Amino acid sequence: MAELLDGRLLAKDVEDRLQQVVAAGLERAGRPPGLAVLRVGDDPASGVYVANKEKASARVGIASHGAHLPAGSSAATVLAEIQRLNADPAVDGILLQLPLPAGLAEGPLLNAIDPGKDADGLHPCNLGRLLKGEPGPRSCTPAGVMALLARARVPLEGARAVVVGRSILVGQPMALMLQAANATVTVAHSRSRDLAALCREADVLVVAAGRPRLIGAEHVKPGAVVVDVGIHRLPPSAADGPSGRGGLCGDVRFEEVEPLVAAITPVPGGVGPMTVTMLLVNTVASWRAAFAPPVAGAGGEPAAADPLADLLP
């Protein structure tokens, strides 16, 4: 039976460490870290995601400075709100919740976020820092995947890694992070020729194709580690009843793949919780950089280990 890479369990551990960091730095900083999640419109799923992020922030001591703009807001209105948050000294992290309403282009608005406050790690400056191996906020989902692999002690140096998916949100930064860990990386996608053969070469297979149940037993090498980034809601079945919502699935056919591999992420409960947690890590890291609260003990005590050392670039 495969080891389950439990994102919920690791997220709880990281939240506990974030609480320690915030508590240790409050006196010197004079304020808690601040995260602003900017939501535009009334997409129901976005409402749930924003609420979950704000609850997670509260658990670790991060103040929420978010705003909710109406669906009809102009690009100028959203840009003005981003600029206000950029200038607010109480805000350390800004996230523009996607998707945006029709008519609003996300690119210019994401690029308007101060790179130092880019809690999602998606600003071109921060993607460039990732490419160059420089410190900076990291894309939350691939950073969460790396944390899961590290917790499971999955050897990456010299390993063959295949990333299925080439989005700027997950696939591309995921490949860069695996390369930085000295893995040999192939980026594939749903149109790759003989995708199954490519995937079977992987010691570590990360699937972020956005295609429900794309990857099955024919795609995996026995003993590989499989990380499923996808999450999709299936249509209701007759068993769900007239008001049923249907179940959740990933990009991987879990029931086929799990018996073959050494470790795998469940859906839900795998990568998803870590995506939110790495958003908090980026925010706290930005706050700590601004005030540089000491990690060492006070009064000449020996230096304490940095609780976030394994999560930061």
Image (cartoon, rainbow, N blue to C red):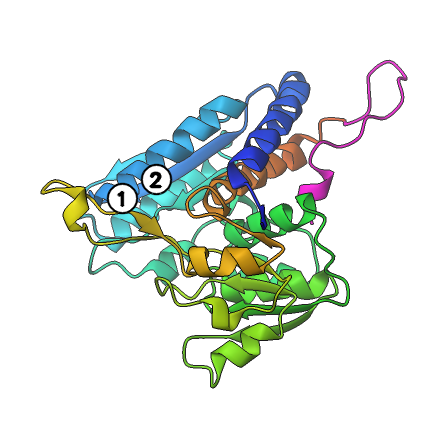
Looking at the image, which residue is at 41% across and 27% down? 55
Q: Secondary structure at mark 1?
A: helix
Tell whether position 299 is magenta.
Answer: yes
Q: Secondary structure at mark 2?
A: helix
Q: CA distance from mark 1 to mark 2?
A: 6 Å
- Kindly indicate the quadrant of the structure image that contains residue 110: bottom left
Q: Amino acid at mark 1?
A: Ala
Up the image or down, 44 lies above or below 33; here it is: below
Up the image or down, 62 lies above or below 3; here it is: above
Give the residue at the far bottom of this rendering.
193
Residue 132 x/y as whole percent:
69, 64
Question: The magenta stretch spans which residues?
Answer: 295-313
Tell whether position 16 is magenta.
Answer: no
Residue 288 x/y as whole percent:
65, 32
Looking at the image, which residue is at 55% across and 42% down? 278
Residue 1 x/y as whole percent:
58, 49
Front residue of 246/89: it is: 246
Do tag 1 and tag 2 residues touch (Cβ < 8 Å)?
yes
On the question of residue 127 being in view, the answer is no
Q: Which of the labelled discs sits on residue 49, or is there none?
A: 2
Up the image or down, 184 lies above or below 148; here it is: below
Front residue of 183/74: it is: 183
Give the residue at the far top of this rendering.
299
Mark 1, residues whose alpha carbon is within 10 Å: few (<14), some, or many (≥20)?
few
Looking at the image, which residue is at 51% across and 55% down? 258
Q: Circle 1 is placed at which residue position?
A: 45
- Kindly indicate the quadrant of the structure image that contains residue 232: bottom left
